[in-house]
């Protein structure tokens, strides 16, 4: 597994989905380890992050790490390692915020239409 990225996280981490999505869409080999299920992994994350269980934490094949990266930071790192990250990967990484923005716009349009019809 020398070319595999290790992704430490836990299910309640809000940033885990975007990171996993970006890795998957970029066709990056990675292993996800839940630090709530693996004490050795939790200890490794604490060692990397000065005693904090900050996740997601990624460990790259070259030994470098990223902790709680933004999608942009992770994209830059992946590009520096030779991976291609296209628009689909970016969209996957930002799928949750895009959904809520679109939902908000839809609600705003609906309210505008209903007001113009005199409903309220």
Image (tube, helix red, strand yellow):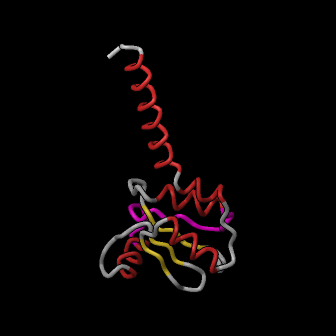
Give the residue displayed 59% in from the left and 73% down from the top: 5
Give the residue displayed 65% in from the left and 68% down from the top: 29
Give the residue displayed 47% in from the left and 76% down from the top: 66
As displayed, is residue 67 above or below residue 27? below
Q: Which x, y percent locates residue 79?
A: 64, 75
Give the residue displayed 53% in from the left and 70% down from the top: 74
Name the quadrant containing residue 107: top left
Tell how many labels: 0
As displayed, is residue 92 above or below residue 38? above
Q: Quadrant of the N terminus?
A: bottom right
89 is within the stretch colored magenta: no
> Left of 50 or right of it: where is 103?
right
The foreground one among 77 and 3 is 77
Q: Which x, y percent locates residue 32?
A: 53, 64
Q: Which x, y percent locates residue 111?
A: 39, 25
The foreground one among 85 and 58 is 85
Name the quadrant containing residue 21: bottom right
37 is within the stretch colored magenta: yes
Please state the extent of the stretch shown in magenta in the rendering.
Answer: 26-39
Q: Quadrant of the C terminus?
A: top left
Query: Which residue is farthest front?
Result: 116
């Amino acid at each position: 597994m020398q070319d595999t990225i290790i992704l430490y996280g836990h299910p309640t981490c809000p940033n885990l989905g975007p990171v996993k999505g970006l890795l998957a869409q970029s066709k990056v080999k990675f292993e996800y380890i839940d630090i709530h299920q693996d004490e050795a992994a939790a200890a490794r994350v604490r060692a990397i992050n000065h005693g904090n269980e900050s996740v997601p934490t990624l460990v790259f094949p070259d030994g470098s790490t990223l902790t709680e990266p933004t999608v942009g930071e992770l994209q830059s790192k992946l590009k520096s390692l030779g991976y291609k990250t296209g628009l689909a990967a970016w969209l996957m990484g930002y799928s949750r915020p895009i959904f809520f923005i679109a939902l908000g716009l839809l609600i705003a349009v609906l309210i505008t239409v209903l007001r113009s019809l005199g409903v309220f």
